[in-house]
Image (cartoon, rainbow, N blue to C red):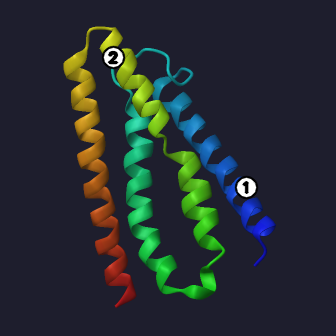
Amino acid sequence: MGQFRILGLVAVGGIIGSLGRYALDLLAAGTLPLVPQDFPLATLTVNLVGALAIGLLAPLLLARSSWSPARPFLITGVLGGFTTFSALAAQSGVMLLDDQGWLAAGYLVVTMVGGLLAVRLGVRISAKRLR
């Protein structure tokens, strides 16, 4: 498969993932991303769902070489566009500037620990499918 085709798959996947994240921001927060809010539930949700999805998909895609175009499309493109470290950092920074250090710390811990647990859960589910 040519590099330009792979780049196209990543780009299309990124568009799909980014639009999904933006839509979830609007649905969950009722506002544009990075507007100060009590708790950035939309970003936490996309990051945890994205971690679970990567845990589910990575073992399946790696086990099936015939699906090689799906890896850059789904993992790098869709899930890379859907999840967001930059929003996590920016929202945590807004909390810190708003003197909400404990909330920022809690958000970071829940995101990191929850993300790791979500990947592990996804891998376990995938492993059962591969048996």
Question: In the picture shown, does residue 59 fall above or below 99?
Answer: below
For the C terminus, the image quarter is bottom left
Identified at 28% across, 55% down, the residue is: 116
Q: Which image quarter: residue 13?
A: bottom right
Q: Secondary structure at mark 2?
A: helix
Q: Which residue sits at x=54%, y=20%?
A: 31
Packing grade of label 1 (10 A; few <14, some 14-19, many >=20) is: some
- Residue 86 percent location from the top left of the image: 48, 34
From the viewer's perspective, tell me whether residue 105 is left or right of residue 96. Answer: left
- Where, by quadrant of the figure, is residue 22 drawn? top right
Residue 67 percent across, percent down from the top left = 61, 81
Residue under label 1, please give it: 12
Q: Is residue 64 above or below residue 4?
A: below
* Circle 1: element type: helix
47 up-or-down from 33: above or below:
below
Residue 104 spot, x, y in % from top left: 27, 24
Q: Quadrant of the N terminus?
A: bottom right
Q: Residue at x 41, y 45 (%)?
A: 47
Considering every residue shown, the one lying at the far top of the view is 98
User: Residue type at mark 1?
Assistant: Val
Q: Residue furthest front?
A: 3
In the figure, residue 98 lies in which quadrant? top left
Alpha carbon distance from label 1 to label 2:
33 Å
Q: Which residue is mark 2?
A: 95
Q: Residues within 10 Å of mark 2 (few under 14, many from 20)?
A: many
In this rendering, position of residue 84 left or right of residue 73: left
In the rendered structure, find residue 90 and report the number of the disc placed on it: none
Amino acid under disc 2: Met
Q: Are marks 1 and 2 in contact (CB under 8 Å)?
A: no
